[in-house]
């Protein structure tokens, strides 16, 4: 699987702290004993030279094993061999490929992580890959044999014959020569495992015609597991019959891990719903360590990563530009699932009537440890993190992008209905441009729900009286230990935490100096930190620090 920067940092920290690895690198072999085709670590920190390993592979099969306290195996330097020998990597925990590994002949690879159990993973890091020159080579990962394919046509044909099989992309592939696909390249619903082995498919172009299916992507429908694959310079243009569109899958109910895409998507015709950079609809599936950098035009439920999410999204991100689309979000257009440890840096420009948010346009469910940095320009309701939050739990999250809307605008949420917001903040600007019902607040434009242990430095502007924290508080809304900056907010009246109601309980104005001089009363130091060199001196979330 590929990893986001946050996950990679954590992995390196664990590796550094434990130093319990057998590393295959350019360094001299140390604490490794090789005998009878087996090389075993003899110390907690062991090194096997790539040149030594290549010499051994020239003569026969080689198994590299952990032992003596070394529990992981990592390949950190280029490795290649041209013989028919099999390289077997057997680890008590994870096996990681952090460089290029090339099987140049009819050789083979076997990976056994966690001794074949659940305590380890096979990881392919960004920029790394496992390449086979010959599709008849053998690849076995944790007991499963993978059929190697070198192009999209071979993959589609193999899945059509056995939708539940295990397949791996043997090498890089340029789909430019394929021309335009008039339907999803893989039309059969997929329920097996596809391992991209760190490779990239370039220049994929999907241009459905009126006879294409309603779900469009590289995979029309994924019910299995997709891993370690990139798409670069991909193009997707929907037709009027498309209901779910994404560069990886039209609909996903399976798993995706270590997926990255870049390209252009145009899906703004009548009838087009659920459009995302990765998936049109994540219908109960799980996405982890996936990312999209796309220019996207959509119509309804449009997200930089996923159009509609009913499943789980972890450690994922989106960047680029999103234009048009009711219910538009930098990461997800419509979220009814769980989003955690994820972020978006998408410019949302000129969205249609509906909700728009830097992370999610409309959201129920849960959002935790997330952030959004993209600007939001909404025709109706706009929020730095979420446009419309309905029965949504938000925790340990923040937004920094500028927000502009016509009806409701909030630095964090445009409109809150039954939302619970805790340990969150906004440091941006928010404004509404017209309308007798226009409301703007540092955190929430139109507010019904609960607020706790949060703050705003957002500069607010609007035709009605702005609020330092909320524009309009609906009867029944509650707040506690929530603050706004009297100096940066354009709301210097300490009685105007809520624009429509003076002295709203639980909302307190502080000077800029006060906000930077120590954690406000009620902020848990186990959750919040403060440092002059982090977040411009304002309180920040220990578990979700701002990007540096």
Image: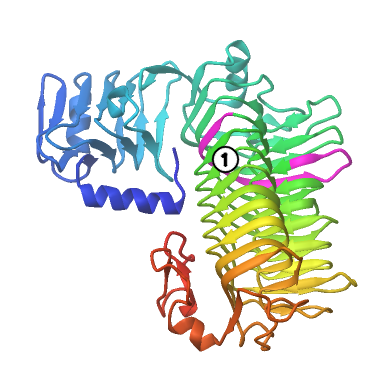
Magenta segment includes 257: yes
**Local crowd size for mark 1, using a 10 Å CA cut-off: few (<14), some (14–19), many (≥20):** many
Where's the N terminus, which quadrant? top left
Q: Is residue 256 left or right of residue 413?
A: left
Regarding mark 1 in the picture, which secondary structure is present there? Answer: strand
Q: Is residue 149 left or right of residue 487?
A: left
User: Residue 454's quadrant in the figure?
Assistant: bottom right
Extreme residue in the top direction: 161
Q: Main secondary structure of the magenta part?
A: strand
**Is the residue 342 above or below the residue 54 in the image?**
below
Q: Which residue is pictured at 38% across the width and 21% down the height?
A: 139
Q: Which residue does the image show at 62% across and 57% down from the upper left?
A: 420
Quarter of the view holding residue 88: top left
Q: Position of residue 11 (x, y in %)?
A: 34, 48
Q: Is residue 334 magenta?
A: no
**Which residues are drawn in magenta?**
254-274
Horizontal and vertical percent position of residue 239: 84, 36
Q: Pointer 1: what residue?
A: 312
Task: Tell me if residue 266 can be seen.
Answer: yes
């Amino acid at each position: 699987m590929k990893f986001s920067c946050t996950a990679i940092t954590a992995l390196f920290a664990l590796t550094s702290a434990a130093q319990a690895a057998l590393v295959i690198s350019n360094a001299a072999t140390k604490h490794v004993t090789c005998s009878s085709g087996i090389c075993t670590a003899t110390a907690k920190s062991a090194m096997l030279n790539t040149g030594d390993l290549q010499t051994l592979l020239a003569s026969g099969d080689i198994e590299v094993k952990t032992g003596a306290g070394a529990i992981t195996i990592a390949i950190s330097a280029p490795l290649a061999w041209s013989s028919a020998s099999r390289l077997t990597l057997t680890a008590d925990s994870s096996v990681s490929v952090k460089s290029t590994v090339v099987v140049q002949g009819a050789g083979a690879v076997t990976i056994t992580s966690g001794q074949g159990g659940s305590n380890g993973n096979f990881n392919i890091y960004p920029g790394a890959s496992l390449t086979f020159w010959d599709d008849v080579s053998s690849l076995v990962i944790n007991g499963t044999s993978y059929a190697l394919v070198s192009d999209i046509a071979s993959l589609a044909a193999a899945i059509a014959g056995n939708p539940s099989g295990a397949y791996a992309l043997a090498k890089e592939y340029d789909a430019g020569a394929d021309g335009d696909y008039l339907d999803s390249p893989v039309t059969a619903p997929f329920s097996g495992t596809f391992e991209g082995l760190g490779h990239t498919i370039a220049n994929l172009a999907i241009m459905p015609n009126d006879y294409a299916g309603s779900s469009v992507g590289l995979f029309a429908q994924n019910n299995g597991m997709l891993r370690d694959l990139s798409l670069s310079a991909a193009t997707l243009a929907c037709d009027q019959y498309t209901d779910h569109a994404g560069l990886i899958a039209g609909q996903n109910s399976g798993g995706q891990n270590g997926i990255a895409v870049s390209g252009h998507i145009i899906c703004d015709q009548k009838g087009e719903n659920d459009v995302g950079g990765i998936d049109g609809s994540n219908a109960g599936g799980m996405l982890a360590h996936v990312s999209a950098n796309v220019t996207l035009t959509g119509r309804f439920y449009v997200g930089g990563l996923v159009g509609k999410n009913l499943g789980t999204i972890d450690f994922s991100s989106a960047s680029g530009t999103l234009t048009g689309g009711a219910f538009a979000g930098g990461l997800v257009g419509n979220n009814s699932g769980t989003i955690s440890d994820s972020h978006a840096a998408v410019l949302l420009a000129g969205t249609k009537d509906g909700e728009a948010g830097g992370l999610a346009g409309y959201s129920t469910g849960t959002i935790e440890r997330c952030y959004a940095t993209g600007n939001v320009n909404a025709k109706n309701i706009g929020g730095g993190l979420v446009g419309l939050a309905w029965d949504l739990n938000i925790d340990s999250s923040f937004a920094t992008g500028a927000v502009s809307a016509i009806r409701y605008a909030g630095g964090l949420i445009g409109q809150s209905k039954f939302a619970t917001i805790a340990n969150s903040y906004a440091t941006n600007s928010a404004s509404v441009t017209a309308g007798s019902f226009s409301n703007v607040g540092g955190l929430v434009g139109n507010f019904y729900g609960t607020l706790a242990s949060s703050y705003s430095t957002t500069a607010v502007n609007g035709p009605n009286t702005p609020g330092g924290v909320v524009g309009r508080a609906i009867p029944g809304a509650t707040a506690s230990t929530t603050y706004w900056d009297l100096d940066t907010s354009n709301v210097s009246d300490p009685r105007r935490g809520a624009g429509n109601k003076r002295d709203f309980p639980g909302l307190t104005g502080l000077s800029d100096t006060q906000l930077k001089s120590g954690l406000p009363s009620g902020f848990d130091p186990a959750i919040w930190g403060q440092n002059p060199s982090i977040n411009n001196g304002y309180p920040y979330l220990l578990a979700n620090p701002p990007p540096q």
